[in-house]
Image (cartoon, helix red, strand yellow):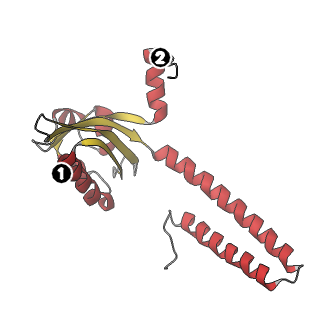
Amino acid sequence: MADVLPCAPSDLAAALEASGFVGSWMHDLWEGHITLTAPFARILGIDPERAAEGVPVAIFLERMHPDDRARIENHLHVAGESGGPFEAEFRTLHARHGVRNLLMRGRIEQDASGRAIRGCGIAIDLTENRAANLQQAERLVNRMAEHAIAMRGLVEGLNRPALAKLVDGLMIEIGFELARHLRGGQDLRQH
């Protein structure tokens, strides 16, 4: 087992902040309410005092991107049926914070009879990581395009139509990948 370095409380707080930690949550499955810590509630645009007392899951879901609501509602329902580990990623909609990518991770606890009773866990803001990953991917695709263009110029000198056709196919695929990044991740091919 690896040694664990002890952390001072200030080091732990800095590590949590650097990891994107924004708060914790507790879902009372029987009451249909979710309790959120203040920072998590603020990102969702929910009054922190109200969130500390617990808000209906419907209010929590309203604060999500419309394209994610049904999926997360279903995910909460399924997790409530089975218990165990829980992980859900969604986007938020908040006028002041804009669209944020959040991850909820935790566990759904069960009572002695095996019925799920409550879930609890943490929330992590993935927005900065996503933006950094997207920028890195865009740089890689641009470099691939530059190399493919150079390969196309080199293959023309060989007078090898089959090889030129393969490089052309590669350039088309790289073009689709570039377009996907320009359109925010949507795949434009209609296979």
Residue located at (21% from left, 47% from top):
82
Q: Is residue 123 left or right of residue 59?
A: right
Give the label on residue 7, or none: 2
Camera-nearest residue between 52 and 161 = 161
Front tag of 2 and 1: 2
Q: Which of the labelled discs sits on residue 25, or is there none?
A: none
Q: Give residue 58's mark.
A: 1
Residue 36's image quarter?
top left
Helix, strand or loop at label 2? It is loop
Q: Gap in Å between the C-alphas at discs 2 and 1?
A: 38 Å
Give the x, y percent position of residue 46. Answer: 25, 42
Q: Is residue 16 above or below residue 55?
A: above
* Residue found 16% across the figure and 33% down from its top: 53
Q: Which residue is more in the foreground, 106 or 149?
A: 106
Amino acid at the residue labelled 2:
Cys
Q: Amino acid at mark 1?
A: Ala
Q: Position of residue 178 (x, y in %)?
A: 61, 67
